[in-house]
Amino acid sequence: MSRRARRAGPPRVSTTLVTIVTIGCGEPRPDGAATRPDVADLVPPEATPTTVVIDTSRGAFEVAVHADWAPEGAARFLHLVDAGYYDDARFHRVVPDFIVQWGLAGDPALTAEWLNNTIPDDPVVATNTRGRIAFAFTEPGTRTTQVYINLIDNVRLDAAGFAPFGEVVRGMEVVDALYSEYGETSGGGVRRGDQSRIVREGNLYLDREFPLLDRLERARRVNGTGGDGT
């Protein structure tokens, strides 16, 4: 197994967002309370997306992360990338003409640490078109670590609250080529699949029962604050 993810504290990007909210609260009201910040105050001012390179057993693809689309989701994804959480994971759900999903760690002890570490919901700003990436969840307020990439235009997911935070900008052919013959049987999604064995046993279970699944070897950011760029 590749390097174990570091124990994670509060996401650095989310800390930045808190600072921005504090600065953008506006003038105090006469009663001494600050005015409610506008939605724009929650979004970092930089317009340039952060690029994340994801190396897989099929090759590499690049994701442009847009904090202005979904700031909470973007912050969590980048924090997990920087911590190495996704390294040596498996693409456990690949459904043709739908999505590619991953986000349960290869080490079940690491998955357990994050299982209930949720983030607040983001409003849906960008639509679920082909190549865009968002967090999977069951009920509102339950996003943790699992993400998916749309293989086709899945705009119907917008109304269900799935908020894309980025998009594949290079290497979509790699995403399309990820092994898909297992479909839903190798874990399925958080809403209708049975992921209990992956949660309990991690890669030991997946590699034994579904040996053809493709691997996420390493995820790393190549621009933007916080990554090593290597």
Image (cartoon, rainbow, N blue to C red):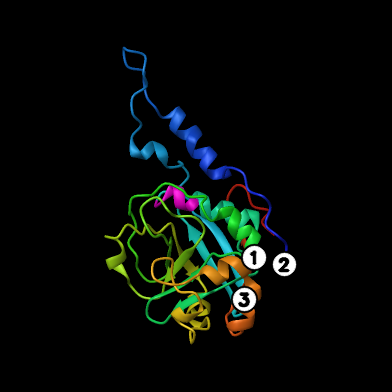
Q: Name the outermost residue toward the bottom.
A: 181
Labels 2 and 1: the sequence-earlier one: 2
Magenta extent: 69-74
Q: Nearer the viewer, residue 70 or 93?
A: 93
Q: Nearer the viewer, mark 3 or mark 2?
A: 3
Residue 102 sits above or below residue 226 on the image: below
SS for dot 1? loop
Q: Position of residue 223 (x, y in %)?
A: 59, 54
In the image, what residue occupies the spot 41% across and 49% down?
68
Residue 148 sits above or below residue 206 on the image: above
From this viewpoint, is residue 186 visible?
Answer: yes
Q: Which residue is mark 1?
A: 87
User: Label 2: few (<14), some or many (≥20) within 10 Å?
Assistant: few
Residue 156 sits above or below residue 14 on the image: below
Q: Position of residue 33 (x, y in %)?
A: 36, 18
Task: Give the Cα distance between marks 3 and 1.
Answer: 17 Å
In the image, what residue occupies the spot 58% across and 55% down?
80
Q: Which residue is mark 3?
A: 205
- Residue 156, quarter of the rendered image: bottom left
Task: Give the Cα distance between marks 3 and 2.
Answer: 17 Å
Quadrant in which the N terminus is drawn: bottom right
Q: For residue 84: magenta?
A: no
Residue 22 sits above or below residue 72 on the image: above
- Residue 203, quarter of the rendered image: bottom right
Q: Say what amino acid the circle numbered 3 marks.
A: Tyr
* Mark 2–mark 1 CB contact (< 8 Å): yes
Q: Which residue is mark 2?
A: 2
For this view, does 40 lie left or right of residue 170? left
Q: Say what amino acid the circle numbered 2 marks.
A: Ser
Labels 3 and 1: the sequence-earlier one: 1
